[in-house]
Image (tube, rainbow, N blue to C red):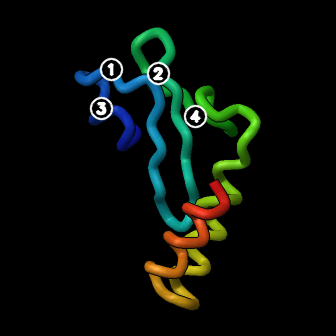
Amino acid sequence: YSAADDYLPYRVPEMWLFKKNRLLIHWLENGEYVLQETSRFFPDVDIKTIVTHCLQVATERGTGVALRELRSSL
């Protein structure tokens, strides 16, 4: 069982879950969620690195700073 399975009734095509300091990306395929390395919607964006960096900045310098940096980088 995966926490992503909670979203099966809603048929969300892609789930991003942060668990134990790791970003897990799941795609809905054939009625079940399958763990993936990348986003199907942002295949050329290193989502995992961006999220890790954003959380590190939030811890070190605050959430507001992290969100401003994230917004400006996107």
Q: In this view, does 33 lie to the left or right of 22?
A: left
> Label 1 amino acid?
Arg
Q: In this view, does 25 lie above or below 53?
A: above
Q: In this view, does 49 lie to the left or right of 17?
A: right
Instruction: Please state which of residues 74 and 8 is positioned toward the viewer in this rendering.
Output: 74
Q: Is residue 41 above or below residue 21?
A: above
Instruction: Please state which of residues 73 and 46 is positioned toward the viewer in this rendering.
Output: 73
Please state which of the two labelled residues, at mark 1 or mark 4, is closer to the viewer: 1
Q: Name the residue under label 1.
A: 11
Residue at the farthest top position: 30
> Label 2 amino acid?
Leu
Judging from the image, what secondary structure is the residue with disc 2 in?
A: strand
Instruction: Please state which of residues 5 and 41 is positioned toward the viewer in this rendering.
Output: 41
Q: Is residue 19 above or below residue 62?
A: above
Labels 1 and 2 touching (C-beta < 8 A):
yes
Instruction: Please tell me which of labels 2 and 4 falls first in the chain.
Output: 2
Q: In this view, does 73 lie above or below 11?
A: below
Find residue 28 and name its label: 2
Find residue 48 and name its label: none
Tell me the residue at 52%/34% (across/down). 26
What's the CA distance linking mark 2 and mark 3?
10 Å
* Circle 4 crowding by C-alpha within 10 Å: few under 14, some 14–19, many from 20: some
Judging from the image, what secondary structure is the residue with disc 4 in?
A: strand
Find residue 35 and name its label: 4
Q: In which quarter of the image is residue 32?
A: top left
Judging from the image, what secondary structure is the residue with disc 1 in?
A: loop
What's the CA distance linking mark 4 and mark 3?
14 Å
* Circle 2 crowding by C-alpha within 10 Å: few under 14, some 14–19, many from 20: some
Tell me the residue at 50%/70% (across/down). 67
Instruction: Please tell me which of labels 1 and 4 falls first in the chain.
Output: 1
Q: In which quarter of the image is residue 51?
A: bottom right
Q: Name the residue under label 3.
A: 7
